[in-house]
Image (cartoon, grey):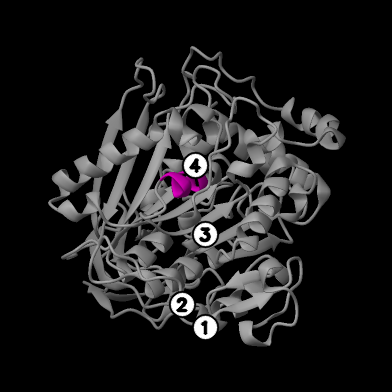
Amino acid sequence: MNEISQSKRIASQTRPSLESPARRLLMKGMAGLGATLASSSLSAAVAAQTQLHQPGAPANQVPPDQVEWGPFTPSCSGGRYLQLAYPPSTLKGELQIGVTYTLWIPENIKTVRAVIVHQHGASIPAAQAGATSAYDLHWQALAKKWNCVLLGPSYHVLNDAIDLTPGGAELWFDPRQGSDRVFLRALDEFATKSGHAEIATVPWCLWGHSGGGIWANVMSILHPDRVLAAFLRSGTAAMFRPKHEFIQPEVPPSVYEIPTMVNFGIGERGNLPWDGSIATFQEYRTQGAPIGFAPDPRTGHFCGDSRYLAIPFFDACLQMRLTEWNKILRPVDQSSAWLATPFGDTATPAAEFKGDPKKATWLPNEAIAKIWTEYVRTGTVIDAGAPLPPVNVRANADANHGNEITWEAEADIVSGLGGFIVLRDGHGIAKLPTQPPEAVYGRPLFQGLSYHDTPVAPLPQMRHVDSSAQPGGKHVYTVIALSSAGVPSMPSLPAAVE
């Protein structure tokens, strides 16, 4: 049994409430990096949880049950996928572990305006989960809106080490160890393979979790002119200050022009992700940086419902900063900013804020301030808007199995895609997904939601077989989409089978 399957099995057997301390400890035990970074006061409890897991493979051995890195069969046929894989290098200064990059390109895109990077964290389960990130319909909706591409790197770590151990994650999440160089090489090759030469030069939106947050933070420091915005979930360079082998990068003033959000779980209090997130916020904000601060009241080291803050945050930043020229970004517009007290839950227009603005949470506009307020109070953001109805519904008779219904749908950019209801002759006959998730990390999604904010492989298909239909019967099928909040769309156009 591979480690992802093992983690799912344990979670399904031991499922305390989302807010409970027991669940937080379980999540740390499953996360690799989260467990390793646990404070001494939690170490005994975490150790008890991690005893349930199979031991990690030696540094020089790839686990025999490691899942595939893709390509996967997409949930929907829209867009184009490209993949590049690079073996580990033995040369000094180059990446010493393998990596696979998956790029999603929206259909009919004329000019790519930015690259949205969804970077997984440390540990083998995180790397495996990251292999599906470019297939995420919700993140694809953001990319499509702004004519961006979605990039999912997946580093082939050999163990759960978070240092420079051979095969360990610090070999990639410190970009100076070679991942910076291979990332730029991949962009150049994707530019050639895709026919979109601009991919090599357009700006980046960097999302990173845990070790991926460290990577995104350091990449912002190394390439501040390329970074349009950054969202750092439970990971910054500052959190590795106690690690002597991780030399802290010198921050150039241009980094303080990048709109950034630090986001972490309240359950991480006393751990390095907590300390690093707070330190980064305070140091950047003192320099006047447009940086937000969003503690998640429901989670520990897992991502929870953070996407409902991250995607709108990037949406606002893309609108604010993109120009007609791919090498030129607009400066942050401070005229629409809102401010809030860190660890508070009320935001006000910047001009009305009564405290010290250089100690305040920065938010780009009123809409994000409203979303942020709900998120820091509840750990999620509920949207009452209805998603778009499914399209291209088809019904085909199969004498041996029943009627096969297929369709296509896009995720709502605000609230994602929770599932579908299939109707026959106006009556509901199926709700997808048919099974509840084995482990709940946030609002359930049609594609599943992993600890690492990625879809769960194998990816579900937009397909249902109606085996209860009478052979030869004439039926009309429609499909309704559900947002992650359970809000239904209008029914699709009907498809008849005779």
Residue 295, located in which quarter of the rendered image?
Answer: bottom right
Residue at position x 48%, y 73% in the image? 414
* Residue 31, numbered circle: none
Callout 3: helix, strand or loop?
Answer: helix
Residue at position x 53%, y 80% in the image? 365
Viewer-proximal residue, 456 or 323?
323
Query: Which callout, 2 or 4, points at the residue further toward the start of the chain?
Result: 4
* Spatial separation of the CA atoms under disc 4 and disc 1: 30 Å
Residue at position x 50%, y 17% in the image? 166
Q: x, y (%) of residue 367?
A: 54, 81
Q: Quadrant of the C terminus?
A: bottom left
Between marks 4 and 1 in the image, the one whose residue lies nearer the viewer: 1
Residues marked 4 and 3 touching at CB (< 8 Å):
no
Q: x, y (%) of residue 127?
A: 48, 35
Callout 1: helix, strand or loop?
Answer: helix
Query: Which callout, 2 or 3, points at the residue further toward the start of the chain?
Result: 3
Q: Amino acid at mark 2?
A: Asp
Query: Which callout, 4 or 1, points at the residue further toward the start of the chain?
Result: 4
* Residue 333, numbered circle: 2
Residues marked 2 and 1 touching at CB (< 8 Å):
yes
The residue to which callout 4 is attached is 215
The residue to which callout 3 is attached is 256
Above-or-below relation of 475 to 243:
below
Q: Amino acid at mark 3?
A: Tyr
Q: Which residues are magenta?
A: 216-222
Q: Amino acid at mark 1?
A: Ser
* Spatial separation of the CA atoms under disc 1 and disc 3: 18 Å
Q: x, y (%) of residue 11?
A: 68, 42
The residue to which callout 1 is attached is 336
